[in-house]
Image: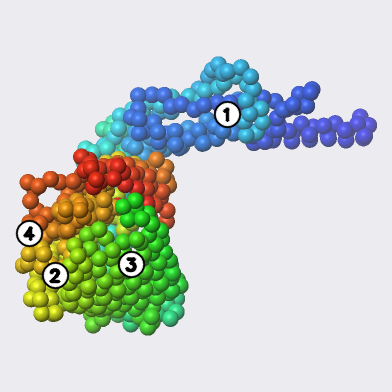
Amino acid sequence: MPARLRWRCCLALLVVAGLTACGRNGLLLPLERDNGEAEDLIRYEVAVEGDLPEELRRRLLDASDAERLVERPPASLLVLRRRAEEDLATLRQVLRSEAYYAGEVRYRIETVPVPEGPTEGPAGPVTSPGTRLLFEVVPGPQFTFGAAAVEVEAPADGFVAPSPAVLGIDTGEPAVAETVLRAEERLLELARQDSRPLARLGQRTAIVDHDLRTMDVTLRVAPGPRASFGTITFAGDAGIAETFLRRRLPFETGDAYDPELVTRGRRRLIETNLFSTVITEVGDELDPEGRIPVTYRLRPRLHRTIGGGLSYQTDVGPGLNAYWEHRNLFSAGERLRADLSVDPLDTLAKLSFRKPEIWTPGLSLLAEVAGEIQDTDAYKSESVRVGTGIEYEFTEKVIGGLGVAYRYGDVRQEGQRDTFALLSLPARLTWDFSDDLLDPTRGGRLQLFGSPYFDTMGNDTRFVKSQVVHTRYLPVLDEHRLVLALRAAAGSISGADRDNVPADERLYSGGGGSIRGIGYQLAGPLDDRDDPIGGRSNVEFSIEARTRFTETLGGVAFLDGGSAFSSQLPNFGETLRFGTGIGLRYITGIGPIRLDVAVPVNRRSGVDDPFQLYVSIGQAF
């Protein structure tokens, strides 16, 4: 054979071999027709057949690569088969993770009719007959836990292994892989809670018995030695006194190691609002004294903030609030804040100061000066208030406060003008066990307030004012799709008749913050002109169903009720006022933007408007 001919034959063979290799790796390009158009793509759908729990069927579909690639139709049945075959091992693994160790998975491909005419796919026109990829799953019996044990690797150093039941592994229960993983996490957590920061998991043993349909499992842990806290380091704390940061931590060098204390310290540093991120690092070895070092890596944020907001209520009118805040005034977390809020009924200017961690961790010093002008249907008042006090954090969720305040005010009601100079000793206790400050979905809050008041102007006016507010949030459906929010509030004034209590210190109900649909302060006693006169007690309650349509849009339906009363205690023999309505919520990073429309129930002619509109930031409660 001539040399030139031999070279041409070799070149042809190399081209054929190359195309064949590409085909084996799924890299064949669509064949070109005579008219230059690409070969039709294979449009398909994926289904899982078999007598399966729906949750397992969903998990199998979620694990399928063929299902994830359904919007990228293959060019041939060969590529589709390859997708199915690659899925088989994955689906079998899913079955084993759910304790179906004898499960079987097969597949078949069926042709199904599709509507006439071509459709467009991501890679080109899809005109081939419809195709269905069916995974036939026979799960078999679900295996259960048989013998279970927890072994402690030497040196145990006094660590006693918890029982498998304590870790959540119970003989006879389904041998689900997630149960084993959670048990290992709990085992490691218990070891570290026993002041063993170097605790590590050992090699797990799992033996599946196909005859008995059980799985025997042995968990192992190397607990390591007990340790105490060693050197505590703060990295990135520019401009913030280290003594303040150390007081924020619930532990000191030499205390027994506890991972929960490390986590709580991180939360307390974040709560200062001085840092954008706080990262915790626990050392991987002990120092010569048997102590473990801890480092908090801090990324400071700007210490000054300015902000504001707008609101609108039909019974009040438009509202504006603005504030300026410095959160590190003297380099130890001191907060100075100026607030201004203005609406047609109330103008308030306030300057407040807070000095945290004084004398002992959790104790803060508070001071405030405020001026306010109110012009409501009930009264007109001008007042100045100064006050100081202390606040103590009993736990992360329970905070109490005690103070002294002095308020000078000029109040006019029903043509009568009175001047008061009230000395008060306010006390409060709050318990917040909700999951979110601005948009809670579970838990609740309890607020208690009480204060005696003494008039220093010679009027011999003395009274005690107390209030309680409780809210509760109950998730009805998962993923915040439906939350039931409840609120109940009550107040009482004792020690003086109503007319001897300044009008701006009496109790009122009605409006966007209490009973929506009823005008501001209009749920309670009224004078001859249908203006509110306030009372010595009140009661309010609300129920609100909150739902989410999307990640950023939600809706509510609500019913509010209550009233103020002339008596010292609520008189339920008197008429209560109710309002009901619906609303929209637009979820933002600073809380939901609220739009509520409410109507009064049993509307009073000449008193109640046909409806009320409320626009503001944050949930109603």
Mark 4: secondary structure = loop
Query: Disc 4 marks which amino acid?
Result: Gln
Cα separation, mark 4 vs mark 3, equals 29 Å
Crowding near pointer 4: few (<14 within 10 Å), some, many (20+)? some
Crowding near pointer 1: few (<14 within 10 Å), some, many (20+)? many
**In this rendering, which labeled residue sits more in front, label 4 or label 3?**
3
Residue occupying image coordinates x 63% and y 29% = 120
Residue occupying image coordinates x 70% and y 33% = 29
Query: First in sequence: mark 4 or mark 3?
Result: 3
Query: First in sequence: mark 3 or mark 2?
Result: 3
Query: First in sequence: mark 2 or mark 1?
Result: 1
Q: Which residue is mark 1?
A: 80
Cα separation, mark 2 vs mark 4, equals 15 Å
Residue occupying image coordinates x 17% and y 49% = 562
Tell me the number on the disc at residue 568: 4
Tell me the number on the disc at residue 451: 2
Crowding near pointer 3: few (<14 within 10 Å), some, many (20+)? some
Tell me the number on the disc at residue 347: 3
**In this rendering, which labeled residue sits more in front, label 3 or label 2?**
3
Judging depth in this view, the residue of 381 and 257 nearest the camera is: 381
Mark 2: secondary structure = strand
Residue occupying image coordinates x 36% and y 39% = 97
